[in-house]
Image (cartoon, rainbow, N blue to C red):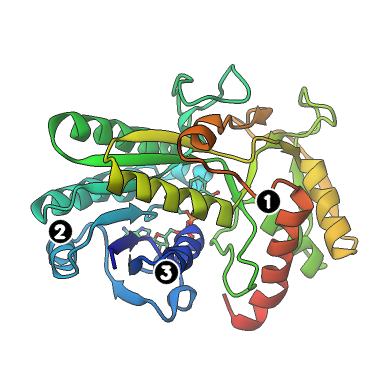
């Protein structure tokens, strides 16, 4: 069985990929400092509490477990916070990731899968966005992803290090089991915030801007189900272990849904009313961000299953309606 180190594996996306790795016959070893993740998300799996900035610990773990590939989900993820505290983001998402690369090279582990983001594109002109669009990240968060992609490119040229960067659009939904799901502090993602309004009568969800150049005036985003993301990771891993060439792929649904459409979907799925208010646009929010995922579909033979927004929201609702009881 191939041992895969899943750094940041106790978080939202990492915990889903960890389950899928095991289902597909790999042996995931989760490495996480629990700054944003939960030990219980990966109960039943090998778990090491550690920081990706800890060179000695990483070299030990990588060698001890004969790791074949590292999948790195470990990073801070809040765009707004990154604007306020850029150094926090450059330290965790760039400096510590470089330490992870140094440890990998020291331990002779040279296969890497990277959680990149649509944030590398900034405000692109071509929609849906292909991978070759100009990368002009607007936030420090987006820049951290861009910098690491550049480092991975240089490493691939200089060394036998090979990496696949996966640029996720808006990860959404939860495992069908309802046992794991999205839990960020602070939560900034739309679907969990709308569901919060369903569950908490004191909370009002805000629509930031209703005068965009879109059919209903609200921003359109590409929601991709977390288990569809997981499948793409497995395909990328298999490709990396077989052919070993570095590459970059967008991962999105290919369909955009507006903020109002997501809110309507939550109403349909939950059958409940909740309070919504309209606010001003947030600076830097592009009107539309939708991926072209045709490269992943053609080259990785990846096909998202959850293309309907209600199907995505239904899994999120199942998770959110149970999680309070579990204390996440
Ligand atoms: N959620 C999305 O919509 C989305 C979109 C695009 C890209 N991404 C990227 O996907 C990855 C996972 O996102 P997520 O939503 O699961 O976030 P998350 O916060 O749920 O998971 C991140 C995990 O990394 C861990 N971590 C953070 N810094 C660490 C460090 N220095 N050492 C060890 N562990 C550390 C946290 O404890 C957490 O468990 C991130 O890299 C994020 O930038 C997410």
> x and y percent of residue 241 in the render?
28, 49
Q: Residue at x 45, y 31 (%)?
A: 120
| Mark number displayed over residue 306 | 1
Of residues 185 and 258, the one drawn nearer to the viewer in this rendering: 258
**Residue 268 image-quadrant placement:** bottom right
Q: Which residue is mark 3?
A: 22
Q: Residue at x 59, y 18 (%)?
A: 126
Q: Crowding at label 3, few (<14), some or many (≥20) Cα neighbours within 10 Å?
A: some
Of residues 189 and 308, the one drawn nearer to the viewer in this rendering: 308
- On screen, 318 above or below 164? below
Q: Which residue is mark 2?
A: 55
The disc, 1 or 2, on the residue closer to the chain's N-terminal end is: 2
Hey, which residue is sitting farthest top in the picture? Answer: 125
Which quadrant of the picture is home to ligand 1? bottom left
Q: Nearer the viewer, mark 2 or mark 3?
A: 3
The disc, 2 or 3, on the residue closer to the chain's N-terminal end is: 3
Q: Quadrant of the C terminus?
A: bottom right
Q: Whole-Å distance between the Cαs marked 1 and 2?
A: 39 Å
Q: Whole-Å distance between the Cαs marked 2 and 3?
A: 26 Å
């Amino acid at each position: 069985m191939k041992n895969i180190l899943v750094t940041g594996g106790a978080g939202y996306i990492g915990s889903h990929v960890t389950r899928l790795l095991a289902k597909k016959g790999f042996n995931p070893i989760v490495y996480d400092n629990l700054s944003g993740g939960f030990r219980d998300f990966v109960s039943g799996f090998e778990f090491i509490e550690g920081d990706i900035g800890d060179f000695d610990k990483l070299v030990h773990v990588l060698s001890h477990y004969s790791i074949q590939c590292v999948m790195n989900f470990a990073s801070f993820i809040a765009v707004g916070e990154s604007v306020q505290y850029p150094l926090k983001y450059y330290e965790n998402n760039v400096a510590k990731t470089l330490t992870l690369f140094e440890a990998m090279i020291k331990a002779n582990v040279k296969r890497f899968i990277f959680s990149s983001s649509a944030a590398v594109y900034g405000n692109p002109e071509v929609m849906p966005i292909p991978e070759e669009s100009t990368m002009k990240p607007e936030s420090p968060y987006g820049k951290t992803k861009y910098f690491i992609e550049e480092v991975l490119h240089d490493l691939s040229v200089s060394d036998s290090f090979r990496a696949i960067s996966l640029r996720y659009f808006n990860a959404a939904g939860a495992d069908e089991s309802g046992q794991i799901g999205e839990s960020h502090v602070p939560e900034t993602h739309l679907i969990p915030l709308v569901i919060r309004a369903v569950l908490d009568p004191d909370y009002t969800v805000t629509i930031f801007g209703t005068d965009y150049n879109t059919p209903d005036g609200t921003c359109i985003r590409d929601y991709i189900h977390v288990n569809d993301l997981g499948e793409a990771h497995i395909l990328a891993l298999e490709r990396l272990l077989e052919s070993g060439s570095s590459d970059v792929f967008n991962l999105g649904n290919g369909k955009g849904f507006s903020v109002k459409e997501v809110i309507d979907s939550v109403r349909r799925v939950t059958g409940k009313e909740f309070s919504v208010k309209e606010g001003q646009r947030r600076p830097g929010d592009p009107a539309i961000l939708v991926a072209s995922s045709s490269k992943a579909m053609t080259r990785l033979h990846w096909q998202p299953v959850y293309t309907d927004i209600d199907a995505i929201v239904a899994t999120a609702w199942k998770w959110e309606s149970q999680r309070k009881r579990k204390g996440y």
